[in-house]
Image: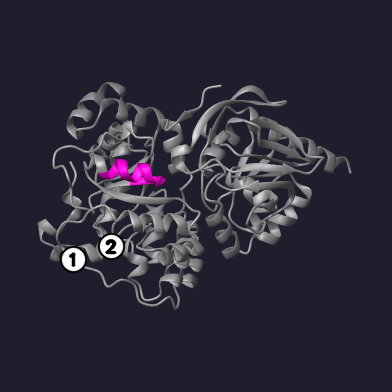
């Protein structure tokens, strides 16, 4: 009897189990417990939420392993953690600690400005950000088991996540509608691996799940992303930078599941307090835009 | 008779089960509220995160309806669904709690320990491709419960009257044999109820 660990089925399957759920950024055990109690499907353990990373400046790195460990000990739901783009050792360290998923994330300062991790070589599954199908397909080609829109992290502004989700899905629909003899040129134009486009054409959809991330601030934002075809939602700064994190977390979880039940969304949005303030994307200079990181 | 099979659609691998049900020639119905339960002959509890699903069940005030449904109609729990069905869970209070098994959550370790393995399932298939993801196991069963599969001595699939549960994810493969087994259970139960 042969046992297979870290296979594509096992890694992509793990991401499938998160579907319809909300993954919340947390910086300590207390926040992790709040997230779990509210119904999060996983937590992302990190040192600072993206909006604080913006304020702090400097180089943003993998979280202190003590924080990751503290979160892992606090909850029974899966724990994810972020590694810098291309930082082989941060990723291996997180894998050795037993985190359930690694986010090779543009929220942190990239360690390599040319190459992403070869994620197929790891036992642990990876999630990566994307703005279009070219990025999405390159990350899948490298072995990502899950995608998320990049959006614009830490802004509390949904506009970039909407742009990225619509773009990826429109490009997926275009590939599905193409003849097979048109795929190689499309691969060239997108900078996408041919095999990934072929898989999309054959299956009629992306071969991995695609969550929304980067700017989700309210229950209605989460529901909007589900309406646009997201498989689930990451909420970074949106929960613990809100006035009442417990209520916000519960409301976003419900709005994600029942995203077309508008009476329910209205009900859960009442008296949950003030969301994260938010930033107009046009006020960010290009060097402050995290979505430009990654290649 | 075409069966109507519900899939609890609060969170998790819902569409994968829907596809499997449709491939077997049955109707799949998404269950998000107690009204949705009225029209189904059997219910599938999908894989996902059991803690999150329980919260969503509570938010939707769905637990009494699920428990009532389970008194009469067949239910198939996969992975997180197994936890929801179990009458006892180690270090945790039960949820629907109608299948007479004791479950242990995350019994095989964290995600890096997740695996796939060919498994022999009694009365279903000799070499079923079983995918275990942060899977639970069944640590003990009531004496009338039929053990359908074990892995390295641990129970990973069992049937108790009109309940069936497995630790692994049949929806992640193209193998429909376990789904067909469940549909046969649903058909049997429906015919029994018609005869009464």
Q: Position of residue A281 (x, y in %)?
A: 18, 62
- Find residue B52 and name its label: none
Question: What residue is rendered at 54% in x and 40% in y?
Answer: B108
Are marks 2 and 1 in one subunit? Answer: yes
Chain letter behind tag 1 = A
Q: Residues within 10 Å of mark 2 (few under 14, many from 20)?
A: some
The residue that mark 2 highlights is A48
- Quarter holding the C terminus of chain A is top left
For residue A105, above or below residue A280: above
Q: CA distance from mark 2 to mark 1?
A: 9 Å
Q: Is residue B8 magenta?
A: no
Chain-order first, disc 2 or disc 1: 2
Residue B11 falls left or right of residue B31: left
Above or below residue B97? Residue B167 is above
User: Going 26% across and 61% down the picture, which residue do you hit?
Assistant: A50
Magenta extent? A90-102
Quick one: label 1, few (<14), some, or many (20+) residues within 10 Å? few
Residue A93: within the magenta? yes
Which residue in the structure is indicated by mark 1? A56
Relative horizontal placement of residue A24, taking residue B88 as reference (left or right): left
Indicate the quadrant where residue A189 lies: top left
Q: Is residue B113 left or right of residue B56?
A: left
Residue A259 appears in the picture as rendered: no
Judging depth in this view, the residue of B43 and A140 nearest the camera is A140
* Magenta stretch: dominant secondary structure: helix
Residue B137 in sight in this render: yes
Against A249, residue A66 (above or below) is above
Q: Position of residue A242 (x, y in %)?
A: 35, 72
């Amino acid at each position: 009897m042969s046992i297979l660990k870290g296979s594509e089925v096992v890694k992509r399957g793990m991401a499938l189990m998160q579907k319809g759920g909300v993954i919340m950024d947390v910086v300590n055990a207390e926040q992790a417990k709040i997230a779990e109690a509210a119904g999060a499907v996983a937590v992302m353990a990190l040192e600072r939420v993206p909006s604080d990373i913006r304020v702090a400046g400097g180089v943003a790195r993998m979280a202190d392993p003590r924080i990751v460990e503290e979160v892992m000990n606090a909850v029974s739901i899966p724990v994810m953690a972020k590694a810098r783009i291309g930082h082989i050792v941060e990723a291996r360290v997180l894998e050795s600690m037993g985190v359930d998923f690694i986010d090779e994330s543009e929220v942190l300062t990239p360690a390599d400005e040319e190459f992403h991790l070869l994620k197929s070589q790891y036992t642990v599954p990876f999630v990566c950000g994307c703005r279009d199908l070219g990025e999405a397909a390159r990350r899948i080609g490298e072995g990502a088991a899950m995608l998320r829109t990049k959006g614009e992290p830490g802004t509390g502004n949904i506009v970039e996540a909407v742009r990225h989700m619509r773009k990826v899905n429109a490009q997926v629909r275009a590939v599905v509608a193409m003849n097979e003899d048109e795929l190689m040129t499309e691969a060239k134009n997108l900078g996408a691996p041919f095999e990934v486009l072929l898989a999309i054409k054959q299956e009629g959809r992306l071969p991995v799940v695609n969550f929304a991330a980067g700017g989700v601030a309210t229950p209605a934002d989460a529901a909007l992303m589900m309406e646009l075809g997201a498989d689930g939602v990451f909420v970074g700064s949106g929960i613990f930078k809100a006035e009442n994190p417990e209520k916000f977390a519960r409301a976003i979880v419900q709005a994600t599941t029942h995203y077309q039940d508008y009476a329910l969304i209205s009900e859960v949005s009442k008296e949950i307090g003030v969301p994260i303030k938010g930033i107009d994307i046009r006020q960010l200079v290009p060097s402050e835009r995290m979505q430009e990181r990654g290649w | 008779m075409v069966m109507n099979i519900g899939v609890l659609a609060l969170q998790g691998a819902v569409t994968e089960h829907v596809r499997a049900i449709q491939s077997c020639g049955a109707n799949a119905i998404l269950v998000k509220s107690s009204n949705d339960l009225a029209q189904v002959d059997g219910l599938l509890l999908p894989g996902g995160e059991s803690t999150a699903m329980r919260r969503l069940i509570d938010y939707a005030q769905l637990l009494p309806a699920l428990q009532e449904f389970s008194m009469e109609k067949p239910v198939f729990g996969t992975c997180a669904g197994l936890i929801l069905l179990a009458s006892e869970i180690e270090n945790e209070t039960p949820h629907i709690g109608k299948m007479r098994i004791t479950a242990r959550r995350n019994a095989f370790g964290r995600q890096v320990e997740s695996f796939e393995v060919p498994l022999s399932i009694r009365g279903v298939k000799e070499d079923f491709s079983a995918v275990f993801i942060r899977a639970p196991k069944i640590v003990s069963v009531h004496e009338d419960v039929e053990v359908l599969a074990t892995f390295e001595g641990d129970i990973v699939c069992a049937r108790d009257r009109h309940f069936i549960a497995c630790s692994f994810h049949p929806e992640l493969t193209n193998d429909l044999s376990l789904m067909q087994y469940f549909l046969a259970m649903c058909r049997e139960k429906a015919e029994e109820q018609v005869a009464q």
